[in-house]
Image (cartoon, rainbow, N blue to C red):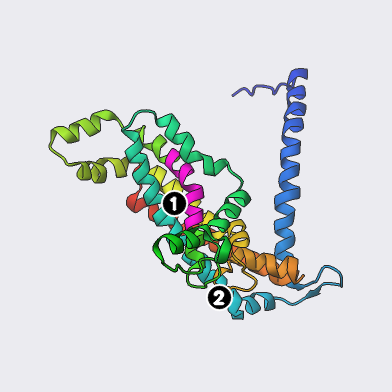
Amino acid sequence: MTTVPQQRPTGWRKRDKWWAAAFLGPQVGGLLVFLVFPLGFAVVLSFMQWDGLTEASWVGFDNFRAQFADPEFGHAIWNTAKLGLITVPVGLGLALLIAVALNSVRGKTIYRVVYFLPVVTSSVAVAVMWKSILASGDYGILNNTAHDLFGVTLPDWLNSEQWVMVSVAVVTIWSSLGLNVVIFLAGLQTIPPQLMEAGRIDGASPARLFRSITLPMISPTLFFTMVVSVISSLQAFESVYILANPAHNDGARTIVYQVYDLGFKQFRFGLSSAAALILLVLTVAVTLIQFGAQKRFVHYEE
C-alpha cells in the first residue's frame, strides 16, 4: 500500500488562511470580549459580595439563597410569568388570525408595512406613547375619553398592581404583532395550494382546513415564534421600566428589573449576578422544555 505524500500549502492557500483569520478575528474577539468574558465574570461574581469599590469577598451560594428568600424576587418571577402567560398565547393567536385573513386578500405588501411599523419603531417611543394613553389623571387619553363620553371610571392602569402587567402585556402584544404576522404570512405561503384544494373537494369546512392542514403545515413557524416570544417575555424590561414604576409597585417588577435594581441602583453586584444567572437557567430550562415538547405538535416535511 503506497502513501501519497502530503503537499505543502501553496502561497495562495497560506494567503487564504491569513484572510480567514482577518475576517474571523474581529468576530471571535467581539464574541470573547462582549459575551464569553462577561458571562464568566458574572458567574464568578454571583458567588461573591462586591459593591464595585471595596474588595470582593467570597460568599458561596449565599447570594442565591438570598434571592430565593427575597419576596421581591418572588414577585419578579410571578410578574414575569404572568406577562408571558398573557403575551405568548394572545399575541401569537391574534397574529395567526390576522395572517390567515391577510393571506387571502390582495395588497398583502401594504398590510405588511402597516402592521410592521410598530416593530421598527423605538421601544422607548412606543412605551412613551402608550404611557400617555394609559396614564391616569388629567393626562390619560383613554381614561379621560371614557369618563367624558360615557361617564365611566376606568382603572389606574399603570399604578395598580392588578392591572399594570395587563397594560404592559397589551403594549407588548401591539408592538410585536407585526413581526409575528409577517412570519406567519411567510409560513402560510409555503403551504402547497393543492392540499387546500384537495381538502375543499373532499368537503372540508374552513375550520377543518385550518385545523387539519394549515396548523400542521405551519407548526415549525409557530414553534419558532413561540420560542422567541417566550424568551422575549422573560427578558422584558424597557416597556415595564418606562410605563410603570417598578421601584414603588411590586406588580411591575420583573426579573430583569430585579437585576438592574440590585446592580445599578443598590450596587450589590453579587446579588445582581445571581439573579441574572437564575434568569439564564430559567430561560434555558423553558427553551429545552419547548424543544422537548415540539415532537408532539411540530410536523417537519420529510
Residue nearer the viewer, 102 or 225: 102
Q: Residue at x 22, y 41 (%)?
A: 209
Left of 17 or right of it: where is 215?
Answer: left
Q: Please indicate, yes or no, whether residue 292 appears anywhere in the rendered image.
A: no
Q: What residue does disc 2 label?
A: 74
Residue nearer the viewer, 241 or 28: 241
SS at circle 1: helix
Q: Position of residue 86 (x, y in %)?
A: 43, 61
- As displayed, is residue 97 above or below residue 253? above
Q: Position of residue 162 (x, y in %)?
A: 48, 72
Judge the density around disc 2: few (<14), some (14-19), many (≥20) Cα neighbours within 10 Å. some
- Quadrant in which residue 210 is drawn: top left
Q: Please indicate, yes or no, whether residue 121 appears anywhere in the rendered image.
A: yes
Q: What residue does disc 1 label?
A: 226
Judge the density around disc 1: few (<14), some (14-19), many (≥20) Cα neighbours within 10 Å. some
Q: Residue at x 62, y 22 (%)?
A: 2
What residue range appears in magenta? 170-182
Left of 208 or right of it: where is 68?
Answer: right
Q: Disc 1 marks which amino acid?
A: Met
Q: Residue at x 63, y 65 (%)?
A: 257
